[in-house]
Image (cartoon, grey):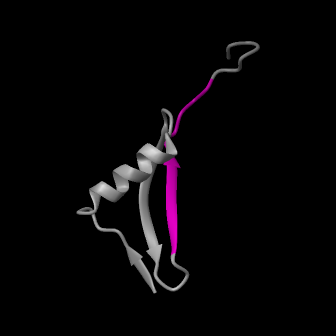
């Protein structure tokens, strides 16, 4: 059975954020714990961004 972490579980969410050390543009969206497999599932997303070519600058 899947258990979705609620917004009240900020301490666990913050622990994962610190442990993962995500850089700019990346963010932890939510985490879930699978009771059956005894496993954490971590969901990471990134902000949409435009990057210039490192060679030509366009």
Q: Relative to 28, is 51 above or below? A: above
Q: Is residue 16 above or below residue 55?
A: below
What stretch of residues is rendered in magenta?
39-51
Look at 70% across and 20% down and name the residue there: 53
- Using the image as rendered, state which of residue 36 and residue 25 is in the foreground: 36
Q: Position of residue 20 (x, y in %)?
A: 51, 46
- Horizontally, is 5 left or right of 36 in the view? left
Residue at 35% x, 58% y is 12
Percent x, y of residue 2: 45, 81
Name the spot of residue 51 as percent of width and height, x first.
61, 26
Most common SS among magenta residues: strand
Tell which of 5 and 47 is nearer to you.
5
Queried whether the magenta region covers residue 7, the answer comes back as no
Q: Quadrant of residue 57?
A: top right
- Where on the picture, by quarter, is residue 11? bottom left
Viewer-closest of 31 and 52? 31
Which residue in the rendered view is the most extreme toward the top? 56
Horizontal arrangement in the rendering, residue 44 relative to residue 10 (left or right): right
Between 49 and 43, which is closer to the camera in this rendering? Answer: 43
Q: Residue furthest left?
A: 8
Quadrant of image for the C terminus: top right
In the displayed structure, 9 sits above or below 50; it is below
Compared across the picture, whether 14 is left or right of 55 comes to left
Image mark count: 0
């Amino acid at each position: 059975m899947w258990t979705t972490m609620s917004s009240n579980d900020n301490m666990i969410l913050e622990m994962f954020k610190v442990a993962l050390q995500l850089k700019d543009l990346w963010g932890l969206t939510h985490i879930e714990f699978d009771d059956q497999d005894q496993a954490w599932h971590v969901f990471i997303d990134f902000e949409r961004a435009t990057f210039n070519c490192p060679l030509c600058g366009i």
